[in-house]
Image (tube, rainbow, N blue to C red):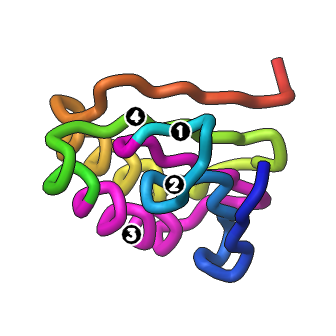
């Protein structure tokens, strides 16, 4: 998929971002690949990028690739819900991809 940043987040790999010039994305698209266990710090690290793009574009489209995801800590669920509450009106579209049923 082109440019990738593996060191940007502890448990996520940014797979594409509105800041990258990619034919597959538009200016308001962000993508994240989560692996392992998601912790509070992981949610707190993506929030500023989502917020900045919302401020710039007015809304955002997000892809969460959870194919390497194991589980989310209970206390992370609260941060996840707060993230969703904060941005629910600004998320134009969201796709969640996983490999488990």
Task: Describe the element under mark 3 as helix, strand or loop.
Answer: helix
Query: Is mark 4 in CB contact (under 8 Å) with mark 3?
Result: no
| Numbered tag placed on residue 25 in the rendering | 1
Residue 14: quadrant of the picture? bottom right
Task: Describe the element under mark 1 as helix, strand or loop.
Answer: loop
Q: CA distance from mark 2 to mark 4?
A: 10 Å
Q: CA distance from mark 4 to mark 1?
A: 10 Å
Mark toward the start of the polypeptide (3 vs 2): 2
Q: Position of residue 17 (x, y in %)?
A: 51, 54
> Would you say residue 8 sits in the magenta stretch?
no
Please give the name of the residue rendered at 31% of the width and 39% of the height, measured from the top-left corner.
60
Q: Is residue 14 above or below residue 26?
A: below
Mark toward the start of the polypeptide (4 vs 1): 1
| Numbered tag placed on residue 17 in the rendering | 2
Residue 21: quadrant of the picture? bottom right
Q: Which region of the structure is painted magenta? A: 27-52
Mark toward the start of the polypeptide (4 vs 3): 3
From the image, tell me which residue sits under label 4.
61
> Would you say residue 46 sits in the magenta stretch?
yes
Nearest to the observer: residue 72 or residue 48 = 48
């Amino acid at each position: 998929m082109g440019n990738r940043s593996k060191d940007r987040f502890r448990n996520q790999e940014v797979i594409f971002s509105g800041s990258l010039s990619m034919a597959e994305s538009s200016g308001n698209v962000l993508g994240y690949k989560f692996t392992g266990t998601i912790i509070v710090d992981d949610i707190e690290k993506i929030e500023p990028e989502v917020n900045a793009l919302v401020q710039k574009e007015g809304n955002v489209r997000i892809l969460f690739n959870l194919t390497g995801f194991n589980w989310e800590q209970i206390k992370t669920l609260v941060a996840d819900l707060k993230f969703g509450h904060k941005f629910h009106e600004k998320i134009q579209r969201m796709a969640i991809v996983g490999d488990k049923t």
